[in-house]
Image: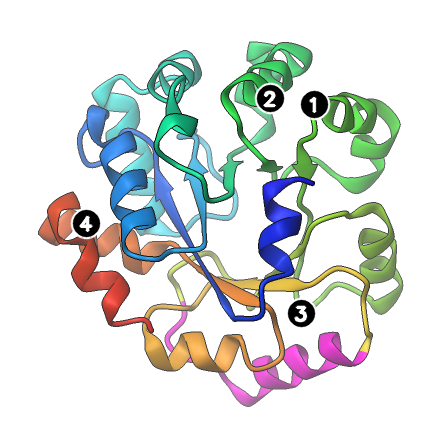
């Protein structure tokens, strides 16, 4: 069974952290992963830097720009992760955009992910129809779970289509704005969380965007299986470095 599926069966609320590969320094990727696992994070999204991100707010955009200036590339990331499963056993997901994957070659990219031990992929700009028509078989052949995003504007019908096409979890974006742009959750967002919970989907949901501390983590996971923290974590390591990751995680739960 894929590590993500195993993790979803655990009887607790899951904390997932997003970070940008090659940031703050190009060789920080593995030390960051090791520190996150050591401090009890359940799952990690490794951000593949891209020059034209669609969904990322300024904090993650800046970290991507910085990582690219550091010399981070897809090939470099794979090189950094080649022995990742010698020390890391939590689920690992690569999150990025379709263009770098296409440039590398879809089949080669997915095969490399399988070889290394990557469990899933999030590509916000690859639509469901395109995925099912052209790429589903490639991902499944390499035991890579493809994770789709839903937002407060996604219709119930569309959500059920995504649920049917999914086999791990659904990334539940809490707001229509970019990452890192919100502070706390409004009543509208809470209603959205409850609406999704009432659909009784077959896949668990992990909430992303707007989670930054213990309070927002608890609110986000009241009706969901877990939550993803990205911008707040990037801000923390920008200010305090990879050495102080334990301080950040300990304040979430």
- Name the element at disc 2: helix
C-alpha gap between disc 2 and disc 1:
6 Å
C-alpha gap between disc 2 and disc 4:
29 Å
Q: Where does label 1 land, which residue?
A: 142
> Which color scheme is applied?
rainbow
Q: Where does label 3 land, which residue?
A: 152
N-terminal of the two: label 1 or label 3? 1
Which image quadrant is residue 29 in?
top left
Q: Position of residue 2 (x, y in %)?
A: 65, 40
Q: Where does label 2 land, which residue?
A: 114
Which image quadrant is residue 155 in?
bottom right
Write the start and end of the magenta stretch as one range. Answer: 182-198
N-terminal of the two: label 4 or label 1? 1
In which quadrant will I find the N terminus?
A: top right
Does the magenta-highlighted stretch encompass residue 189?
yes
Mark 1–mark 3 contact, CB under 8 Å?
A: no
| In this view, the mark in front (3 or 4) | 4
- Name the element at disc 1: loop
The outermost residue toward the bottom is: 187
Q: Where does label 4 land, which residue?
A: 237
Mark 3–mark 4 contact, CB under 8 Å?
A: no
| In this view, the mark in front (4 or 1) | 1
- Name the element at disc 3: loop
């Amino acid at each position: 069974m894929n590590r993500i599926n195993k993790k979803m069966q655990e009887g607790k609320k899951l904390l997932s952290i997003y970070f940008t590969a090659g940031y703050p320094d190009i060789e920080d990727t593995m030390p960051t992963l090791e520190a996150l696992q050591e401090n009890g994070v359940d799952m990690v999204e490794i951000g593949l830097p891209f020059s034209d991100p669609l969904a990322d707010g300024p904090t993650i955009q800046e970290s991507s720009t910085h990582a690219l200036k550091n010399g981070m590339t897809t090939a470099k990331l794979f090189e950094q992760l080649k022995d990742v499963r010698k020390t890391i056993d939590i689920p690992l997901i690569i999150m990025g955009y379709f263009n770098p994957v296409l440039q590398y070659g879809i089949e080669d990219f997915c095969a490399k992910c399988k070889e290394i031990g990557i469990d899933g992929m999030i590509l916000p700009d690859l639509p469901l129809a395109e995925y099912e028509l052209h790429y589903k078989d490639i991902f499944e052949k390499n035991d890579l779970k493809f994770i789709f995003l839903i937002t407060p504007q996604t219709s119930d019908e569309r959500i059920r289509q995504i649920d049917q096409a999914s086999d791990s979890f659904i990334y539940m974006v809490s707001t229509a704005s970019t990452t890192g742009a919100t502070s706390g959750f409004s009543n509208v967002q809470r209603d959205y969380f409850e609406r999704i919970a009432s659909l009784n989907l077959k896949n668990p949901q992990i909430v992303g965007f707007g989670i930054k501390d213990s309070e927002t983590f608890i609110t986000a996971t009241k009706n969901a299986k877990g939550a993803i923290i990205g911008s707040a974590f990037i801000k923390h390591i920008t200010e305090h470095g990879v050495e102080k990751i334990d301080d950040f995680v300990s304040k979430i739960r």
